[in-house]
Image (tube, grey):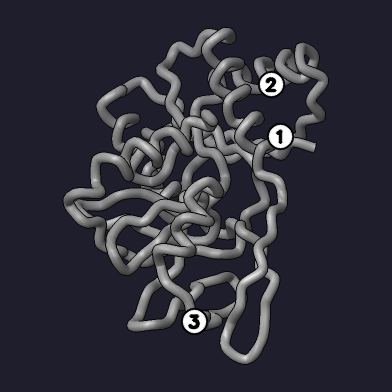
Amino acid sequence: MLKIAIVEDEESYISVLQEYLKKYEQDTGEDIEVTVYHDGDEIAAFYRAQFDVILMDIEMKFIDGMTAAEEIRKVDSTVSIIFITNAPQYAIRGYEVGALDYILKPVPYFTFSQKLGRAVEKLKKRERKWITVQVKGGVMRMELADIYYIESQGHDLIYHTKDGTPVAGSTMKSVEDRMTEMDFFRINKCYLVNLEHVEGVQDKYAVVHGERLLISRPRMKQFMQELTRYWGGRS
């Protein structure tokens, strides 16, 4: 089941989006569960990574969509956020919080279905993948999605993961060759980051699971290209 949240303070647009989701469900055969929030504070206050897609208005009364998205990204780096707004200048800022896309009001169904389809495609590509790592004292099997980033310190590699920071005796170069095709990118000589957990880019830093990691100047352009490709759900 596809779990989708609508965050919108205008009842007319809530109705439109609900109708569009019903039509999308009929057209594609997807099973969709919809939850409606009337302001950013409602979804951000008790968010627990329970949705696959969030359709978020940007301009709302109490907490705007951008602020709500920043709070959501602190606990969920994978949910697809699609901003819906009257103001394209605000929507473009959405990429700072890892938004998948944005749609301008009034929302045509064709555009809506195309952009929701991209989010669904990205979700279906997110299958479980595992690697085996020789760590100090033994060997560990890690799920790729659980690895936030890999840090090089001296002759060691520190795997920053959901369950801790195991240390491996290996070179960054050997790991980089192995992981690049798995949507990891080396942002400088010390950090190899999992694009799935990149929440945004601020100044010269990648925000990865709440941590700011410096992007080297020579790698910035290619990193942004790879991040845009990944967020867009293209292979």
Disc 2 marks a residue whose amino acid type is Leu
Residue 150 to residue 70: above or below: below
Determine which residue is flagged by label 1. Answer: 34
**In front of the other: 125 or 154:** 154
Image point (66%, 68%), residue name:
132
Q: Earlier in the sequence, mark 2 or mark 1?
A: 2
**Would you say the residues marked 3 and 2 are in contact, meaning their CB atoms lie under 8 Å apart?**
no
- Which numbered circle lies on residue 169? 3
Q: Secondary structure at mark 1?
A: strand
Quadrant for residue 98, please give it: top left
Residue 34 to residue 213: above or below: above
Left or right, 128 with respect to 98, comes to: right
Label 3 or label 2, whichever lies nearer to me, is 3
**In front of the other: 136 or 98:** 136
- Which numbered circle lies on residue 173? none
- Please state the horizontal and vertical placement of residue 139, each as a whole percent of the image: 67, 80
